[in-house]
Image: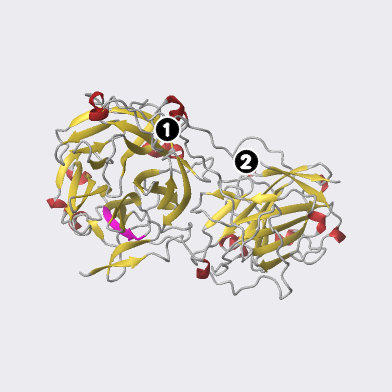
């Protein structure tokens, strides 16, 4: 069957501004407010008025000590491997991270480490980041995703939503990504095993960010290493299949090693396949077993001229691509009762080879499960790196990934650190009702209120990263809550059809969470009758006040609209502005007084032109996407008078 490459552009979260029509204009035809330093911080807007969200600054491990004397080469060799634990990798803007990271593939080219790996976006998806030191990663973004949110999951015959364990090469100007994906799924969602019959598939790219699947003429992704057809769909055994690829390019051939796990035949082994075009690898029956086990990286070391296979504890060496009787060297020991590791890989050159005296490994690491399910500790899974010297260079000082020699002062630059968000606070300013006009323009009454910046990326519920953000100001009096905000959003998209205002969050919008009692203690404190959420759509039409929790109820009519209008949204050159005036809820109105500290949070729901609804979220206080159901994640807002 004739094959061709099918475009993933509609599924990639890489959109240009042109991809999103802004023909809708929230509000009426009044002249939009002028833009003069909309951020209020001296930062000049671009020609379109848009100021992108300021991202977390990431350090680069500095070369503090420039001692580059490695001694005589005659003294380098030994009879064992040496290693240096460099700790956990850090991702830009991924703070208080509770999502798992696994299946890392890293290549080094043009002075930059480039990494592709798996994070959940409802279903597992592929992310990309860059680093100068292998420790601190910037430009974090999602590049392949078939589940941009919980209601929009694309499934193909050979990919049931999940995409796992990428292995990336850059050969003759083209990036090749080999990855695993399940071809079968269980219709019973209560089952522990939801997907099985994995196969190895291929995507290609010219820049490593925009990818195309290898497909048939009908646009269906096709495996390059396929499960035997007669084993597919076995609901009794649910075979894992062919997956966890590890690829390299050598002597004009593509090599892909992969695990082949067929429970029904008691097979669990690593096999190798080769191809001259990177596509046609033949049937699995023709592929050679090179080792028992699964989840291991395999490559060739051009310095030692040996093949290597990596597990989280050992490196296996062989003169041939066969590790069944290979020598093994321990390079990492850890407490197996408390630490979970897996899916170990080599950091490679663009051809997937190791070509330096000191090489590096990267693997999943986190807390060991305390239950029978090994995945129970997944919320702590992050990338973990080591510097490794093979026997030939055992006594040579390590070279760190930033190029410096591993002196004590240079190694100190690789120390682990804690990344936590703190709970924010802000002041809401007192204002008479006559001082504020609900017209979508910022009144002078807000000037002494705290500028609240809604910039914390939320990496849950399928959310990806975005340049959008907002600045918000809060005012109050005994009758009303006032909120004014400017949302910086290149692409206003309200195209997603919703059947209820309860689903306003699936369009470009902002959610305002209000907890006047603010008297809770502990974690995961649920909503009661005293808390509510105000939702404002960017189209000036969507508006609802609803209860919190997993099942929200429309309570808009319980708020008397004494003074109209209740809200106003305007399109601006940089996105949209919004303003609300909402009467205090009757259950808590008597608690509104000077110096009262109430709980609040603000969440931007960002559609990014994919016409699949919400694709990104940002918060002020909460960065886990849980403000809609738990009160303890809200920030503190003080009601003050001048």
Residue at 77% x, 48% y is 428
Quarter holding residue 446: bottom right
**Above or below, comparing residue 80 to residue 149 in the picture:** above
- Residue 271: x %, y % from top left: 19, 45
Name the residue at the left extreme.
Answer: 286
Q: Residue at x 51, y 44 (%)?
A: 94
Q: Is residue 224 above or below residue 5?
A: above
Q: Looking at the picture, how far across and down is residue 309, in whole percent? A: 24, 38
The residue identified by callout 2 is: 525
Q: Residues within 10 Å of mark 1 (few under 14, many from 20)?
A: some
Position of 62 relative to 182 (above/below): above
Task: Say whether residue 300 is visible.
Answer: yes
Q: Is residue 585 visible?
A: no
Q: Nearer the viewer, residue 316 or 324?
A: 316
Q: Is residue 231 left or right of residue 121?
A: left
Query: Looking at this view, is 191 or 121 the one in front?
Result: 121
In the image, 275 versus 232, the foreground residue is 275
**Dot 2 lies on which element?**
loop
Which residue appears at 43% of the width and 48% of the height? 130
Q: Which portion, as a residue range, is magenta?
A: 199-206
Magenta span includes 417: no
Q: Is residue 370 above or below residue 378?
A: above
**158 sits to left or right of 254:** right
Question: In the rendering, which numbered label is found on residue 630?
Answer: none
């Amino acid at each position: 069957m004739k094959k061709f490459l099918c475009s993933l552009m509609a599924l990639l979260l890489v959109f240009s501004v042109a991809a999103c029509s802004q023909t809708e204009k929230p509000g009426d035809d009044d002249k939009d407010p002028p833009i003069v330093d909309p951020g209020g911080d001296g930062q000049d807007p671009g020609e379109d008025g848009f100021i992108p969200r300021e991202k977390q600054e990431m350090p680069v491990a500095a070369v503090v000590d420039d001692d580059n004397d490695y001694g005589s080469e005659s003294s380098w060799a030994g009879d064992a491997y040496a290693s240096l634990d460099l700790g956990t990798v850090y991702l830009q803007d991924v703070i208080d991270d509770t999502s798992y990271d696994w299946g890392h593939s890293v290549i080094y080219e043009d002075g930059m480490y480039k990494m592709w790996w798996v994070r959940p976006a409802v279903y597992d998806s592929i992310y990309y980041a860059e680093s100068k030191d292998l420790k601190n990663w910037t430009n974090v973004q999602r590049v392949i995703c078939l589940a941009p949110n919980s209601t929009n999951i694309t499934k193909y015959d050979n990919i049931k939503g999940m995409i796992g364990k990428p292995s990336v090469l850059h050969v003759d100007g083209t990036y090749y990504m080999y990855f695993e994906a399940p071809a079968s799924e269980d219709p019973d969602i209560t089952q522990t095993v939801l997907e099985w019959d994995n196969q190895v598939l291929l995507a290609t790219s010219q820049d490593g960010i925009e990818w195309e699947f290898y497909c048939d003429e009908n646009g269906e992704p096709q495996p390059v290493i396929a499960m035997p057809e007669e084993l597919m769909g076995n609901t009794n055994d649910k075979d894992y299949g062919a997956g966890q690829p590890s690829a390299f390019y050598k002597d004009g051939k593509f090599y892909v090693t992969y695990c082949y796990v067929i429970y029904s035949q008691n097979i669990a082994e690593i096999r190798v396949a080769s191809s001259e075009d990177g596509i046609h690898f033949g049937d699995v029956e023709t592929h050679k077993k090179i080792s028992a086990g699964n989840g291991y990286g395999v490559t060739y070391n051009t310095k030692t001229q040996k093949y290597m296979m990596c597990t989280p504890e050992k490196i296996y060496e062989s003169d041939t691509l066969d590790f069944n009787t290979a020598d093994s060297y321990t390079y990492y020991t850890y407490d197996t009762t408390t630490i979970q590791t897996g899916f170990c890989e080599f950091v490679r050159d663009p051809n997937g080879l190791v070509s330096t005296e000191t090489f590096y490994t990267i693997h999943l690491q986190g807390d060991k499960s305390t239950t029978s399910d090994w995945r129970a500790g997944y919320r702590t899974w992050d990338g973990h790196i080591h510097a490794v010297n093979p026997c030939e260079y055992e006594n040579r000082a390590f070279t760190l990934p930033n190029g410096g020699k591993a002196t004590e002062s240079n190694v100190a630059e690789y120390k682990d650190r804690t990344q936590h968000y703190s709970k924010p606070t802000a002041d809401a300013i007192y204002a008479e009702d006559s001082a504020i006009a609900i017209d979508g323009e910022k009144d002078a009454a807000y000037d002494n209120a705290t500028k609240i910046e809604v910039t914390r990326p939320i990496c849950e519920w399928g959310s990806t990263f975005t340049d959008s953000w907002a600045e918000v100001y809060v005012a109050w009096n005994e009758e009303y809550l006032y909120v004014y905000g400017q949302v910086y959003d290149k692409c206003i998209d309200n195209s997603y059809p919703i059947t209820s205002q309860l689903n306003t969050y699936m369009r470009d919008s902002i959610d305002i969470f209000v907890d006047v009692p603010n008297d809770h203690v502990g974690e995961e404190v649920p909503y009661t009758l005293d808390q509510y959420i105000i939702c404002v759509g960017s189209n000036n039409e969507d508006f609802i006040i609803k209860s919190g929790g997993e099942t929200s109820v429309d309570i808009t009519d319980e708020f008397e609209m004494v003074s109209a209008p209740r809200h106003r949204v305007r399109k601006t050159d940089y996105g949209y502005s919004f303003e609300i005036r909402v009467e205090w809820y009757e259950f808590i109105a008597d608690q509104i007084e000077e110096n009262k500290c109430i709980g609040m949070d603000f969440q931007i729901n960002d559609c990014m032109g994919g016409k699949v609804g919400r694709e990104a979220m940002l918060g002020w206080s909460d960065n886990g996407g849980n403000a809609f159901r738990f009160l303890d994640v809200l920030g503190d807002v003080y009601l003050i008078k001048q």
